[in-house]
Amino acid sequence: MGRLSNVVALSGELFDALEVNAARTGNHKRAAVRMSRLAVQATAGSMSRAEAHARAGEQWLLADDPTEAVEQFQKAIADGGPTFDEPRVPLARAMFALDRTEDAEALLRELRESDARSKARTCDLVAELLTEQGDLEGALDWATAGVDACLAGDDRDELQLLLRLRYRVRVDLGMPEDDYDKLLDNKKAGPAAGN
């Protein structure tokens, strides 16, 4: 009568399994190829196509292929669906890897002018990227914005990460301890806060 084909739905579990296998085997390219195909061919499931493209892009970065990564991150942005992380940050990382510095810096300016500084996770990712690029003052600015976002919200896990990053950057810049640095010693800034 009719034929049933195997239909694969996009899911976090499927992509998690591909990432774990890539980490185990070191074959990130294989995972990137599979994820890129799934992002286009699979049906919508518990994961958006945008998230699928973004995660494929991360695997392309791990496979040392920033050109393919750029393509996947651009598809994630064009799709406009929800993503766990802001795809413009890893897109900027891939552009830096391709020596497309002006394009990467334009993306970071775009992020600064958007509401990205109110999102602690995005601030953390940008601060890490700027630290890698040697822009410690920019990294400090983004890390501080992330701490402010955490303190305005309730993200204690991200707060701890941002406080540590901010402290390391301040030490590298030769700056004295400040009130935010003292929060590292405050048990309320830790993951168990609010319990």
Image (cartoon, rainbow, N blue to C red):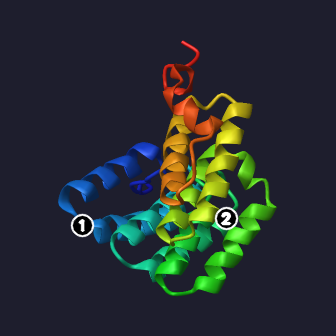
For the residue marked with disc 2, what is the amino acid? Answer: Asp
Element at label 2: helix
For mark 1, does the 10 Å Cα neighbourhood hold few (<14), some (14 to 19), or many (20 or more) residues?
Answer: some
- Distance CA(mark 2)–CA(mark 1): 27 Å
Q: Which residue is mark 2?
A: 79
Name the foreground residue: 171 vs 100: 171
**Residue at 44% in and 56% down:** 2
Which quadrant holds the N terminus? bottom left
Quadrant showing the C terminus: top right
Q: In the image, 139: left or right of 110?
A: left
Sort mark 2 into few (<14), some (14-19) or many (20+) by Cα contacts within 10 Å.
Answer: some
- Residue drawn at x 71%, y 40% is 148
Q: Which mark is residue 14?
A: none
Between residue 111 and residue 59, name the one nearer to us.
111
In the image, residue 56 above or below residue 82: below
Residue drawn at point x = 49 percent, y = 19 percent: 192
Counting labels gives: 2
Q: Is the C-beta separation of discs 2 and 1 under 8 Å?
A: no
User: Helix, strand, or loop for circle 1?
Assistant: loop
Q: Which residue is mark 1?
A: 27
Residue sitting at x 74%, y 70%? 109
- Residue 155 left/right relative to 14: right
Residue at the far top: name it: 195
Type of amino acid at the residue the image marks with label 1:
Asn
